[in-house]
Image (spheres, rainbow, N blue to C red):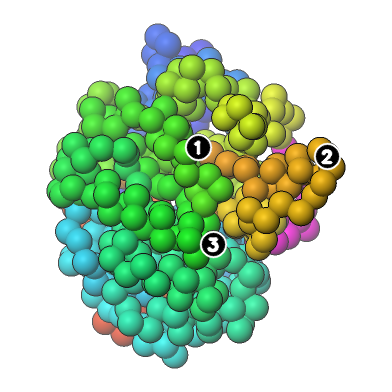
């Protein structure tokens, strides 16, 4: 292997979507993901800006007992559902309970209006939850969309999930309805919502104008205020877009600190190029890798958060995500709970129950304590422990893959799965993947069945 090649893998061609060889290559101080299709040429996209960090970050890609999926017939990534080659059991199962939305953002994962024009009824949602339980047991559930709050029966769906035994259910929302109806947060909480997964791109309206096409900062603040009143925890979820809000990560952390303990964490998502995005390989300046994000967090918080606090997560490929947890002390400083152990990170033992492990994390860090604010303890230690429980902030990130950088090894280890009404589970990055012309690899037909749109003759290696 040439010295500049850091590792080899497989990907797909952005044009014909055939499986092709790919690799991570060091160029100067940067790491690029490159691949070539015999028919459509070479493709190259910036992965991380710091090759040293890439090399130091643990390269783990096998995580769990093999999923007992359906037979692999055409090979990854054409057998989703999950297939027997898949290595990551669900840590989060995403149920798109509607395709409808009350906004029309320029950036949208779900690409509403183009695909997935189905909306499961309650029996359909029950079947989806049953499929998750059967495959992954009690993993975290996310009701998503579209915009799930446009469903009048969302509270019924939450109750259903709880009755079936799921211990963590979060609602992925733009916050519009939560901001408009002061009682809605309490109703969601009473019905079983454990967390609001709130789209939150920044602390000023210029950011929302650029990413969502309208002023929204006030809406987000009001939604958080209503959740705080209802005792419903909030996870801020910024999509980090170079040139728009990549310089505002420190401000988002400051905002989160000011709104604790209702704000339980921040989940940063560097923008990826699918959905409603243009169809060319993004230039370097349009890319922010997960490594770049971690370094920017250290820089923009003036070292309050450090790279050494950030650890790779064991339940997905180590280049998919990072995790860190902090305690906010009385002086308003974040103190890391996770520390200096990323090199010791190792794949979990065979037999590890991943869904349960993931749920331990969400239950511990993403939920508002029941008696929050009512400090009963008279001892200094008791008060400290209470504050420690209430004032933890989890800061995590996930670098979603697009057709330019999709790494099939990462995809096989994916633990974030979209559930379709026919009971199939598909890695989120495969489910939303679009090729250079905007064509989807997967689609859900009008009967709720998951369909791979790649023709049989075009599956497999590019020859
Ligand atoms: S991503 Fe997983 S489920 Fe899909 S084809 Fe690859 S191994 Fe199978
Ligand atoms: S959703 Fe994408 S980035 Fe996240 S774990 Fe799965 S493959 Fe990795
Ligand atoms: Zn090709």
Is residue 397 visible in this depiction of the protein?
no
Q: Position of residue 328 (x, y in %)?
A: 61, 35
Q: Which residue is nearer to you in this view: 414 or 86?
A: 414
* Mark 2 lies on residue: 381
Q: Residue furthest top?
A: 28
Residue that appears at 27% across and 46% down: 217
Q: Is residue 316 magenta?
A: no
Give the magenta part as a residue range: 346-357
Distance of label 2 from label 1 (alpha carbons): 22 Å
| Sequence-first disc among 1 and 3 | 3
Cβ of mark 1 under 8 Å from ligand 2: the answer is no
Whether label 1 touches label 3, CB < 8 Å: no
In the foreground, 342 or 278:
342
User: Which image quadrant: the C terminus?
Assistant: top left
Disc 3 crowd rating (10 Å Cα; few below 14, some 14-19, many 20+) is many
Q: Are marks 2 and 1 in contact (CB under 8 Å)?
A: no
At mark 3, the secondary structure is loop
Residue 232 shows up from this direction:
yes
Q: CA distance from mark 1 to mark 3?
A: 17 Å
Q: Is residue 395 left or right of residue 246?
A: right
The number of callouts visible is 3
In primary-sequence order, the first of circles 2 and 1 is 1
Residue closer to the observer: 369 or 36: 369
Q: Secondary structure at mark 1?
A: helix
Secondary element type, mark 2 = helix
| Label 1 sits on residue | 257
| Lower position in the chain sequence, tag 2 or tag 3 | 3
**Image position of 105 (left or right of 61):** left
Disc 3: which residue? 231
The x and y percentages for residue 401 are 39, 44
């Amino acid at each position: 292997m040439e010295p500049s090649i850091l590792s080899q893998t497989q990907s797909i061609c952005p044009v014909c979507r055939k499986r092709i060889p790919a690799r991570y290559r060091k160029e100067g101080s940067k790491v690029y993901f490159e691949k070539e299709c015999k028919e459509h040429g070479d493709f190259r996209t910036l992965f991380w800006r710091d090759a040293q960090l890439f090399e130091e970050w643990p390269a783990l890609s096998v995580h769990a007992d093999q999923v007992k999926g359906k037979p692999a017939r055409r090979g990854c990534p054409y057998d989703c559902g999950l297939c027997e080659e898949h290595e990551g059991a669900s840590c989060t199962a995403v149920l798109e309970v509607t395709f409808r939305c009350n906004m029309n953002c320029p950036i949208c994962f779900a690409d509403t209006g183009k695909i997935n024009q189905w909306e499961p009824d309650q029996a359909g949602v029950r079947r989806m939850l049953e499929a998750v339980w059967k495959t992954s047991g009690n993993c975290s559930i996310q009701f998503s969309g579209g915009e799930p709050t446009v469903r009048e029966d969302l509270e019924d769906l939450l109750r259903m999930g709880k009755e079936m035994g799921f211990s963590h259910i979060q609602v992925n929302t733009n916050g519009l309805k939560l901001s408009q109806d002061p009682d809605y947060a309490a109703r969601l909480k009473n019905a079983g919502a454990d967390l609001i997964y709130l789209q939150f791109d920044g602390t000023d309206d210029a950011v929302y104008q650029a990413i969502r096409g309208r002023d929204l900062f006030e809406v987000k603040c009001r939604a958080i205020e209503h959740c705080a009143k209802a005792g419903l925890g909030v996870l801020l979820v910024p999509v980090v877009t170079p040139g728009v809000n990549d310089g505002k990560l420190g401000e988002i952390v400051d905002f989160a600190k000011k709104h604790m303990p209702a704000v339980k964490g921040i989940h940063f998502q560097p923008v990826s190029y699918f959905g409603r995005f243009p169809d060319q390989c993004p230039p370097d300046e349009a890319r922010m890798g997960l490594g770049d994000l971690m370094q920017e967090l250290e820089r923009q918080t003036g070292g309050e958060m450090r790279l050494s606090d950030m650890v790779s997560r064991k339940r997905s490929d180590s280049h998919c995500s990072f995790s860190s947890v902090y305690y906010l002390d009385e002086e308003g400083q974040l103190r890391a709970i996770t520390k200096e152990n990323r090199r010791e990170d190792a794949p979990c033992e065979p037999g590890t129950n991943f869904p349960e492990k993931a749920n331990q994390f969400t239950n511990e860090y993403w939920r508002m304590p029941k008696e929050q604010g009512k400090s009963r303890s008279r001892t200094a230690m008791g008060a400290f422990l209470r504050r420690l429980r209430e004032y933890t902030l989890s800061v995590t990130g996930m670098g979603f893959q697009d057709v330019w950088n999709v790494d099939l090894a990462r995809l096989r280890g994916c633990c974030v799965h979209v559930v379709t009404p026919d009971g199939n589970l598909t890695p989120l990055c495969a489910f939303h993947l679009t090729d250079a012309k905007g064509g989807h690899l997967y689609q859900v037909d009008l009967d709720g069945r998951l369909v791979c749109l790649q023709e049989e003759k075009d599956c497999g290696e590019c020859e």
